[in-house]
Image (spheres, rainbow, N blue to C red):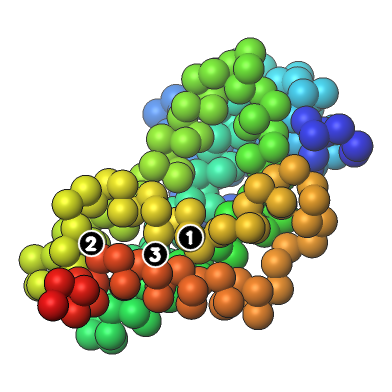
């Protein structure tokens, strides 16, 4: 696959538990997993643009009537594959910023997780697919952003608000600060990756350098202790 839209699907399929018994239309998790596995195989082999619902139907070994009970189109199938990865990601995010560790370590864990994920091959490929399709299907791009990056920023903003209440940070615009931290962690990495200038995912050492620097800058800008020294 050579074009940006002919990139293999980024996230491996994972099958859920099979249940015994009858299910209402569109509610059988085993059948849904069967369709998603077929979609993953087709997208991986053909790319997003070249794939059709007929291809997925044949690969998944289901009827046209069945596949449309579960998914209206291939965009929904693509989003469902991505959603599976997101669930694991948000669980990891929660773990990263919980606990009694110093706030700098929480920021480092969260920033490392985000920087590593956003710049890895799989997610870069997914974002290129979404960008390529968004011009003619803007709702796909909007949904991708809303359910992924924006949800992550809101989650981080909630963490910041809790730390503000503890007196850790002094932040007037929490939403802006949450975006700033993410950008700091990926400074010099994301755009190089998305445009193909950096062909390989950044090394752990490079991510650590970026994120440690991001934490220092963020704490200096918003940490209550740092602001107290600046106002003396």
Label 1 vs label 3, nearer the camera: 1
**What label sits on residue 60 in the rendered view?**
none
Q: Residue furthest front?
A: 232
- The image shows residue 138 at horizontal and vertical percentages of 54, 18
> What residue is at 78 percent from the left and 30 percent from the top?
5
Q: Residue furthest right?
A: 2
Q: Is residue 67 left or right of residue 107?
A: right
Q: Looking at the image, can residue 25 be seen?
A: yes
Question: Which residue does the numbered mark 1 point to in the structure image?
Answer: 184
> What residue is at 57 percent from the left and 77 percent from the top?
208
Question: Which residue does the numbered mark 2 point to in the structure image?
Answer: 160
Question: Which residue does the numbered mark 3 point to in the structure image?
Answer: 93
Real-space Cα separation, disc 2 to disc 3, in angstroms: 13 Å
Is residue 169 placed above or below 83 in the rendered structure?
A: below
> What residue is at 40 percent from the left and 75 percent from the top?
216
Quarter of image, res 34: top right
Quarter of image, res 147: top left
Dot 2, crowdedness within 10 Å: few (<14), some or many (≥20)? many
> What residue is at 27 percent from the left and 46 percent from the top?
175
Give SS at disc 2.
Answer: helix
Q: How many marks?
A: 3
Real-space Cα separation, disc 1 to disc 3, in angstroms: 17 Å
Give SS at disc 3.
Answer: helix
Label 2 vs label 3, nearer the camera: 2
Label 1 vs label 2, nearer the camera: 1
- The image shows residue 158 at horizontal and vertical percentages of 22, 56
């Amino acid at each position: 696959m050579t074009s940006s839209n002919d990139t293999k699907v980024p996230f491996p399929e994972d099958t859920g538990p099979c249940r015994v018994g009858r299910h209402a239309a569109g509610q059988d998790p085993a059948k849904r997993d069967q369709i998603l596995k077929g979609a993953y195989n087709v997208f991986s082999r053909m790319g997003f643009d070249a794939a059709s619902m007929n291809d997925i139907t044949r690969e998944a070994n289901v009827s046209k009537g069945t596949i449309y009970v579960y998914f209206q189109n291939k965009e929904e199938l693509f989003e469902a594959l991505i959603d599976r990865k997101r669930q694991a990601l948000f669980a990891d995010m929660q773990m990263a910023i919980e606990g009694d560790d110093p706030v700098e370590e929480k920021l480092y864990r969260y920033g490392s997780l985000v920087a590593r994920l956003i710049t890895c091959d799989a997610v870069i490929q997914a974002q290129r697919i979404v960008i390529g399709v968004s011009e003619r299907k803007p709702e796909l791009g909007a949904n991708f952003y809303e359910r992924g990056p924006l949800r992550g920023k809101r989650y981080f903003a909630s963490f910041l608000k809790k730390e503000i209440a503890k007196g850790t940070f002094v932040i007037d615009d929490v939403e802006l600060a949450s975006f700033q931290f993410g950008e700091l962690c990926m400074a010099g990495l994301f755009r190089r990756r998305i445009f193909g200038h950096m062909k390989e995912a950044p090394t752990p050492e490079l991510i650590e350098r970026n994120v440690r620097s991001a934490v220092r800058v963020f704490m200096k800008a918003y940490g209550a202790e740092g602001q107290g020294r600046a106002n003396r």
